Amino acid sequence: MNEKDERLLSALIDGEADDGELRGLLGPVDASAPLSASLLRRHATLRALSEATREKARRYNAPLRLKMLPEKMGAGKPARGGGWFAGLFRPQMAGAVLCTALLSVTATSLVLHSSGNDALEGELVSMQLRSLMSANPIDVASSDSHTVKPWFNGRIKYSPPVEDFAAQGFPLAGGRLEVIASEPVSTLVYRHKQHLINLYVLPSRLGARYASLKTTQRDGFNIISREQGGFVYVAVSDLNNAELGELMQLAVNAK
Amino acid sequence: MLGFGKSEEKDKQERFARLVTPHIDAAYNLARWLCGDDNHANDISQEAVLRAWQYFASFRGDAGRPWLLGIVRRTFYDWHAGKKRDALHEEPLEPEVHEQVADESVWAQSPESWAQRFADAEVLNAALERLPVHYREALVLRELEDLSYKEIARVIDVPVGTVMSRLARARELMLVALNDQGIMAYERKR
């Protein structure tokens, strides 16, 4: 196989091969004529390599300080649009710097994605970012579900299931309140390896719109939602999808 | 006059936040893959974001991602040129003329035997880290940042045909490395 054909085969994997050139490589267009075994093997090998690279090569995330740099340069203040994020923000928890940084992140998501699930995902991601940036993402720190569960009493209008999954590798770190659609909502914080996971537990009447997110990804965060036994569970983390799914399964089964 | 300047500044800020700020992760990822360590990646991408803000007035269009990544790349090469005096870390920046060409045996392996080798994330990452920088950047832009050939051409400032050859060659070199398990031998020697 000459160099030109090798280039073409690689471009084919990327969906960038020119049709005319491709016909030259593959021969006359005739469905009954099988392609050569060696050509098929090359193609399969290149495609498997490409998939493995996409899946396994490390993706490095910028440190938060770098992400906040545009803000520091005076470049991070897009026009404020919409008001839906105003209710999400609790100024007592964070300093002014955090406040403006978050608004810029949120407003950016708002400009880019303004409707339907996009807005929901953006909302979840900005809450996740906020909890990551916050020195203490937990209002009640305890691995004891019997401490965390009563803490929510009187703070929210329902009683969420709270379980520790330390034995399965997901220790409960504590709980926190978030305000979603101007309703306080219980948030359970779990840790897994180095990752922080926020698990929002809402009664179905409040969380119906989140249930439709199912499994999705946004800005490097994985989001999984499930509805079970009158509650909607929404897990958000930079943890990979498979392991986040494990926690979701545990949470849903525990009920 | 003053008022006009003010709204122009505001417009610039809004555009930057919309077109450039969302791609800071991609910028850091590219810098990290190019230079190979966290500290320098931080310095390089920070410098690149500052440059982007400085040059932003000359930026046209909506493709903020390739534009920012192009700046990251240039910043890396500038940093690298400055580092050259430190001969210890020298890595040739030009594509090598006499690179080993994959012999046909690489292509004769069955997809199953490749599947086994591709399964090891450590080995795969090590192979990518050790690709010569011209091939590494092309592959990172394609597979990790999912840029089109045209966008890659813009970032690394070469014709699309060159992007095509670089990627084909990059993949071939990955296969050679993974086939030889040359990576493992290298790791043992270190």
Image: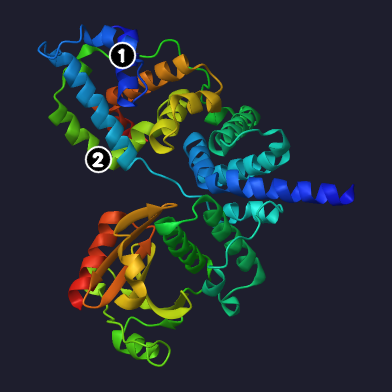
Residue A96 figure quarter: bottom right
Quick one: SS at disc 2? loop
Residue type at mark 2 is: Asp
Q: Residue at x 43, y 64 (%)?
A: A124
Question: Relative to residue A203, is residue B168 depicted above or below?
Answer: above
The residue labelled by disc 1 is A6
Question: Relative to residue A236, is residue A53 depicted above or below?
Answer: above
Quick one: SS at disc 1? helix
Q: Which residue is at the front of the view, B16 or B76?
A: B16
Q: In the image, which disc is placed on residue B120? A: 2
User: Would you say A144 lies left or right of A179 here?
Assistant: left
Q: Quadrant of the C terminus of chain A?
A: bottom left
Whether residue A138 is visible to the viewer of this picture, yes or no, is: no
Position in image of residue A177 (x %, y %):
44, 80
Q: Which residue is at the front of the view, B138 or A34?
A: A34
Mark 1 or mark 2: which is in front? 1
User: Would you say A201 lies left or right of A254 here?
Assistant: right
Q: Residue furthest left?
A: A32
User: Dot 1: few (<14), some (14–19), or many (≥20) neighbours within 10 Å?
Assistant: many
Residue B164 figure quarter: top left
Question: Relative to residue B177, is residue A61 depicted above or below?
Answer: below
Q: Quadrant of the N terminus of chain A?
A: top left
Position in image of residue B30 (x %, y %):
50, 38
Please give the chain letter of the residue carrying mark 2: B
Whether residue B178 is visible to the viewer of this picture, yes or no, is: yes
